[in-house]
């Protein structure tokens, strides 16, 4: 057999810089030293080819007969695979164009073959590699494919997107591979371009929205020839139209983002495509339970879904990771892949059916949570729903825009009323329930339950008039349906509103009626809640008998294994212990609750505020001042305004006055202010005395409220009185994007109305962004 004319190999020259991939590069080389067949897999445009070429170039010395690049993207006939390899090796003898001849030629060689883009000739590649590796022991193969070969001895390395900064990237975006790549490619089309303080936030957001996909980032950089960075970012709501200008030297399917994703879609079977389309309605990821419900459309049966999900994982459409709930696997799509699926779903005509299945799944989830959450799985349920938060949010949003499904939004949002607390989504939960009630006006038991939940939340937000409006309608419906549970719910929440308004005796009487009603109905969850509320009222009435309610609540939570609920009971027992002159015991109980480090900021604020009372009682005045400041910080983050109600405000003021008198006004304020800038984690560490000495002074964020530059811009437009639609038009973004920004602003600032944003902005307008 003739020798190839270029024994050193045939790697194409790199025309652009190679960015990042240190870990993947090292892992590829390591795998090639241990295995003779390594497949780099991942979605299109993620950079598999560049990684393979760089790895091959770095290993030339290990292969005296060369590193050979075999491009397969244009190969249409699987039978021509061996001929394509022979051609890449520079072999002209027709005898080497078949498998046997090629194997004979490679028999005494030590070389590396890089088979690039195997996904469309997958079976042929798997068969041929097995034959070549069996016949030629000095040959190693590095394949790139959107789907694994499933050949004997194959080692797989999934190539992820480039790393992207977390948050707004304000700290160190230079360490992000995606930002580095964008800066490099942008400088090539716009000489002198640099990532600096003026554009850093926009660059980071662009890389985040493009999922760190190298192809997408490079295509976005090319657009800087004709658009500003902000225009490119704003137009990403239609990324498949924007990112259409690539290199003319690459294949058509690699020139645009849409063509790259479309190639993956076309490689899927019709059933796999149906599953891709269906799961695109599930943002943030999903588990098998969700997929089996949502995907059973378009000819797909529940029993088919597992294998189809596995196939999409193999084809790099989905990625799998262990879930945060139990041992459930969790599947995710890159946002770019999900958007393409949504486009295809709309084209298929199946979107209404898929959306209905999505809502059905969320209804089942909410009902199951309501039935099982007051028990040993309580924290697991909260973690599960936090993981599925984006799925729930999407379902609620869909229901509120479909008149036939508004009632489902009412049930889902109201069933999860305590989850919104526990998970730190109090403002959002209140928003969903109010929106659903405004649209779902038919008098039903579900509406009555939602009215009770809405009234409870309104009370927490310091909105007694709104609470009474809901309660008055609830009272009518409770009688209409002759429902004792609804009557008990009305008594419980009306008692809470009276208590927060300063009528502790009236609140106690109403809550005692509620407790009798819930006991008679055997509703342990609401018995617990009412016991905690009653212990609060009796505490502020200085009634020592209230300690019995607190102890019973704690015993009930412990017996049922409801750990989140237990933290409220610990608070209730603690404040009665403090009232009885046992601040040391109270402190221990409160720290036990805080040490669970739950996401419930309302509970955390309650506990830290009570710790301040204990510290003051023990003469630790500087610590009491710091704890009051930390409690205020957490209250602001929670969105609840319970601390502003008359009973709590009175005790906080008494604590502050005594500590201020002991320390002096200046020292008191310094200790208070230092802790008033804490985030939740810092507040927890300080409350648990994990920080030695005084709370450190934390420099306040340059942007009030922690808003990003884009959020500050949108806040300004809200203050001008613009609607979400008008904001979207002004900024050339999708209306849903504008709505999301406004929701984030409300959540960050702990507000519930656009008027509050305008008032806040007027107060802080002089601050730097």
Image (spheres, helix red, strand yellow):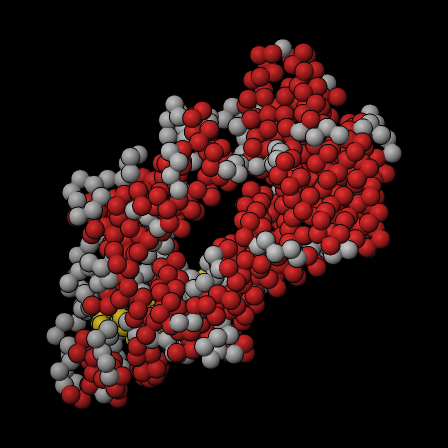
Q: Residue at x 19, y 58 (%)?
A: 245
Q: Quadrant of residue 109?
A: bottom left
Q: Residue at x 25, y 86 (%)?
A: 79
Q: Residue at x 54, y 58 (%)?
A: 406
Residue 238, given in percent of the width and then of the height, sits at 30, 56
Q: Is residue 396 visible?
A: yes
Q: Is 452 placed left or right of 193 in the picture?
A: right
Q: Could you say which quadrant of the image residue 100 lies in?
A: bottom left
Q: Quadrant of the N terminus?
A: bottom left
Foreground pick, 607 / 138: 607
One can see residue 102 in this view: no
Task: Please say if 752 is above or below 559.
Answer: above
Q: Nearer the viewer, residue 25 or 617?
A: 617
Q: Quadrant of residue 10?
A: bottom left
Judge by depth and name the residue closer to the eye, 584 or 253.
253
Counting from the top left corner in percent of width and height, residue 213 is at 32, 56
Q: How many marks?
A: 0
Residue pictured at 80% horizontal, 31% vertical: 505
Q: Where 20 sits versus 122, above or below? A: above
Where is residue 374 drawn, in percent x and y?
Answer: 72, 53
Task: Indicate whether 131 appears above or below 484.
Answer: below
Looking at the rendering, in which quadrant would you find the C terminus?
top left
Q: Residue 311 in the image: state x and y as whole percent.
A: 44, 74
């Amino acid at each position: 057999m003739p020798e190839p004319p270029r024994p050193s190999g045939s790697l194409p020259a790199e025309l652009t810089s190679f960015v990042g991939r240190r870990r993947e590069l090292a892992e590829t080389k390591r795998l090639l030293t241990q295995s003779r067949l390594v497949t780099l897999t991942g979605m299109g445009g993620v950079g598999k080819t560049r990684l393979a070429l760089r790895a091959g170039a770095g290993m030339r010395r290990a292969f005296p007969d060369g590193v050979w690049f075999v491009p397969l993207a244009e190969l249409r006939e699987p039978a021509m695979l061996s001929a394509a390899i022979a051609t890449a090796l520079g072999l002209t003898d027709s005898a080497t164009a078949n498998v046997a001849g090629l194997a004979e030629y490679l028999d005494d060689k030590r070389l590396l073959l890089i088979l690039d883009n195997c996904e469309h000739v997958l079976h042929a590649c798997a068969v041929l590699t097995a034959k070549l590796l069996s016949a030629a022991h000095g040959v190693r193969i590095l394949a790139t494919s959107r789907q694994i070969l499933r050949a004997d001895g194959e080692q797989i390395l999934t190539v992820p997107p480039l790393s992207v900064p977390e948050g707004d990237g304000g700290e160190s975006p230079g360490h992000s591979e995606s930002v580095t790549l964008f800066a490099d490619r942008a400088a090539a089309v716009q000489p002198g371009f640099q990532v600096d303080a003026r554009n850093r936030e926009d660059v980071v957001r662009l890389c985040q929205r493009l999922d760190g996909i190298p192809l997408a980032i490079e295509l976005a950089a090319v657009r800087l020839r004709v658009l500003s960075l902000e225009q490119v970012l704003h137009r990403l709501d239609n990324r498949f139209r924007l990112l259409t200008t690539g290199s003319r030297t690459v294949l058509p399917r690699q020139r645009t983002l849409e063509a790259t994703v479309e190639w993956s879609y076309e490689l899927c079977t019709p059933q796999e495509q149906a599953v891709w389309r269906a799961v695109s309605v599930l943002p943030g990821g999903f588990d098998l339970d969700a997929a089996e419900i949502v995907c059973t459309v378009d000819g797909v049966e529940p029993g088919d879904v597992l294998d189809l999900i596995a196939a999409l994982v193999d084809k790099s459409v989905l990625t799998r990771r262990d879930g945060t709930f139990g041992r459930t696997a969790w599947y995710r799509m890159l946002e770019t892949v999900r958007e393409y699926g949504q486009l295809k779903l709309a084209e298929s005509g199946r979107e209404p059916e898929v959306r209905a299945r999505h809502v059905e799944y969320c209804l089942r989830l909410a009902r199951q949570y309501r039935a099982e959450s007051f028990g040993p799985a309580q924290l697991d349920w909260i973690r599960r729903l936090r993981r599925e938060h984006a799925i729930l949010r999407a379902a609620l949003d869909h229901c509120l825009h479909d008149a036939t499904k508004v009632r489902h939004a009412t049930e889902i949002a109201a069933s999860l009323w305590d989850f919104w607390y526990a998970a730190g989504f109090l403002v959002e939960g209140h928003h969903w329930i109010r929106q659903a009630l405004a649209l779902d006006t038919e008098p039903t038991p579900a509406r009555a339950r939602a009215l009770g939940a809405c009234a409870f939340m309104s009370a927490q937000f310091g909105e007694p008039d709104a609470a009474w409006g809901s309660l008055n309608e609830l009272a009518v419906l409770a009688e209409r349906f002759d429902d004792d549970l609804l009557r008990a719910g009305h008594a419980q929440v009306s008692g809470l509103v009276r208590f927060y308004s300063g009528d502790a005796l009236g609140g106690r009487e109403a809550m005692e009626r509620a407790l009798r009603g819930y006991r008679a109905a055997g509703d342990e969850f609401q018995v617990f809640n009412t016991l905690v509320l009653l212990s609060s009222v009796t505490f502020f009435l200085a009634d020592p008998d209230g300690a019995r309610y607190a102890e019973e609540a704690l015993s009930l939570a412990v017996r049922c294994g409801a750990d989140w609920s237990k933290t409220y009971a610990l608070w209730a027992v603690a404040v009665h212990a403090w009232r009885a002159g046992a601040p040391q015991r109270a402190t221990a109980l409160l720290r036990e609750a805080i040490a669970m480090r739950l996401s419930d900021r309302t509970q955390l604020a309650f506990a830290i505020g009570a710790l301040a009372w204990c510290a003051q009682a023990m003469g630790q005045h500087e610590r009491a001042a710091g704890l009051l400041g930390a409690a205020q910080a957490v209250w602001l983050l929670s969105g609840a305004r319970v601390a502003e109600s008359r009973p709590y405000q009175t005790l906080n003021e008494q604590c502050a006055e005594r500590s201020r008198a002991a320390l002096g006004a200046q020292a008191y304020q310094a200790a208070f202010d230092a802790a008033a800038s804490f985030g939740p984690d810092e507040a927890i560490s300080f409350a648990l005395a994990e920080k030695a000495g005084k709370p450190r002074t934390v420099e306040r964020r340059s942007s009030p409220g922690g808003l990003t530059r884009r959020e500050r811009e949108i806040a300004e437009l809200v203050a001008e009185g613009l609607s979400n639609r008008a904001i979207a038009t002004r900024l050339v973004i999708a209306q849903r994007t504008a709505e999301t920004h406004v929701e984030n602003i409300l959540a960050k600032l702990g507000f519930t109305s656009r008027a509050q944003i305008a008032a806040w902005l007027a107060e802080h307008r002089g601050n730097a962004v």
